[in-house]
Image (cartoon, coloured by chain):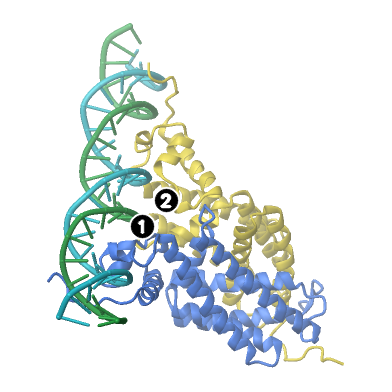
Chain colours: A blue, B yellow, C cyan, D green
Amino acid sequence: MTSRAKHLPSDERRAEAVEAVVELAARSNPEEITTSAIAARMKLTQGALFRHYPTKDAIWQGVMEWVSDRLLARIDRLAGAEADPLAALQAMFLGHVDFIAEHPGVPRMMAGQLQNAGETPAKRMARTLVENYGNRLRRILAAARAEGVLHPTLDIEAAAALFLGMIQGLVMQHLIHGDSARMRADAARVWTIYRAGLLAGPQAREPSPVP
Amino acid sequence: MTSRAKHLPSDERRAEAVEAVVELAARSNPEEITTSAIAARMKLTQGALFRHYPTKDAIWQGVMEWVSDRLLARIDRLAGAEADPLAALQAMFLGHVDFIAEHPGVPRMMAGQLQNAGETPAKRMARTLVENYGNRLRRILAAARAEGVLHPTLDIEAAAALFLGMIQGLVMQHLIHGDSARMRADAARVWTIYRAGLLAGPQAREPSPVP
DNA sequence: GATCAAAGTAAGTAGATACTCACTTTTATG
DNA sequence: CATAAAAGTGAGTATCTACTTACTTTGATC
């Protein structure tokens, strides 16, 4: 008579564990998330966690899969709803920022996994996500350039790298200020500059000389 | 007669420890740098390290101070050598990228400190560095806009955030590809787009309609 | 309703880590 | 050159963490 909790199937517990990690990462350093903390949030003992995942890295793998599925699905849906490729790119960007505002731990977890020393499955999955994301970006950018929406000499790889950096920069500001509403507002302002950079080609030195 | 090693003054050992951390962070996850690893690289026993620093966080504080001093000194020197504010901004950017290429652990350590849960001195110092860096960026951007070099409606705060993001994006690419030479090359290409964004104002939707 | 595998508990274990301490070696100084 | 402080050693300790295990509870199925 030590417990009255229900026994849930392993599938559901696995999903619960992933959500617990995502929520814990929103407020604490991902590296400091222990199996005890995950189990506590699931209202389980620590040992029970290992009935559903063989190792901690398997949990991280599940988390990276969760992120990958949800993020890619969201940006695909948003981008697909726009006819104009530049509008699609903007929708992707703002949708991604929304995703991070909803799940602030996500970029931290990604960075944490990417800089792990060994070649764990979780790290491989994180890298694959970045690659898939980059592929989508380059495809849309190339389409926009082909349609004549962007400057014909635009460096697409650099534009994709800057797109990702734009998000990283907002994440860093968010890390310092801790204000999700502000991040969304900043996102729109940064987008304006990025968009201008995509539309304009490399220009001469003095666009409007002092009178 | 257990040892023949010289006894160095504490000042020098403190500097050695900081350099050891910077070097270790270049190749491994900063969170996984142990006091044993630091001491081993200094060719000391672990216990001896605590003759020079009272806690591990004090070492991190020293590291953040090292980064702050070196990075700010470098960008100030480079920016000061340029008359044109846009050239100064570019010099700052490329100088920062060079700094990261020389010390690849630095951005990882910064990010690690910033996302620590508690309010440690090391974290405060990291945040101060970001603030000081941002102040310099906004000052130069404002000067450039006042001189008419940049578009008069340019959003300076957003431009500064994007500048930092540009660097973060390159760091992320570097994390994935692990190629410093490539990062420097990418930096120049990304700069071209960023620069165009600063020079151009917000534009209408269709700059070059399809024929 | 008996049965048995899946799910959960509670108390482990081994290994790692930051920090301490009693004692020895080195170095500066009168 | 005696001496005392600074620097270093080596063997601690307490705590934490991922993972295990012997046993109990739950729930689906016949």
How far apart in space, not on screen, are marks 1 and 2 (Cα)?
Answer: 9 Å
Instruction: Tell me the residue that label 2 is attached to.
Output: B61
Relative to B53, say whether B115 is above or below: below
Pointers 1 and 2 in contact (CB under 8 A)? yes
| Amino acid found under the numbered disc labelled 2 | Gln
- Chain letter of mark 1 equals B
Q: Could you tell me which residue is drawn at 42 percent across and 50 percent down? A: B60
The image position of residue A56, as x and y in percent, is 40, 60
Image position of D12 (left or right of B183): left
Secondary structure of the residue carrying numbered label 1: loop
Q: Quadrant of residue C11?
A: bottom left
Q: Is residue B138 visible?
A: no
The image position of residue B158, as x and y in percent, is 58, 77
First in sequence, mark 1 or 2: give its number. Answer: 2
Instruction: Tell me the residue that label 1 is attached to.
Output: B120
Secondary structure of the residue carrying numbered label 2: helix
Q: Are the residues under marks 1 and 2 on the same chain?
A: yes
Image position of A124 (left or right of C22): right
The image position of residue B182, as x and y in percent, is 71, 57
Image position of A199 (left or right of B33): right
- Chain letter of mark 2 equals B
Q: Could you tell me which residue is drawn at 44 percent across and 50 percent down? A: B32
> Which of the two residues, B162 or A47, is positioned nearer the viewer here?
A47
| Amino acid found under the numbered disc labelled 1 | Thr
Q: Is residue B70 visible?
A: yes
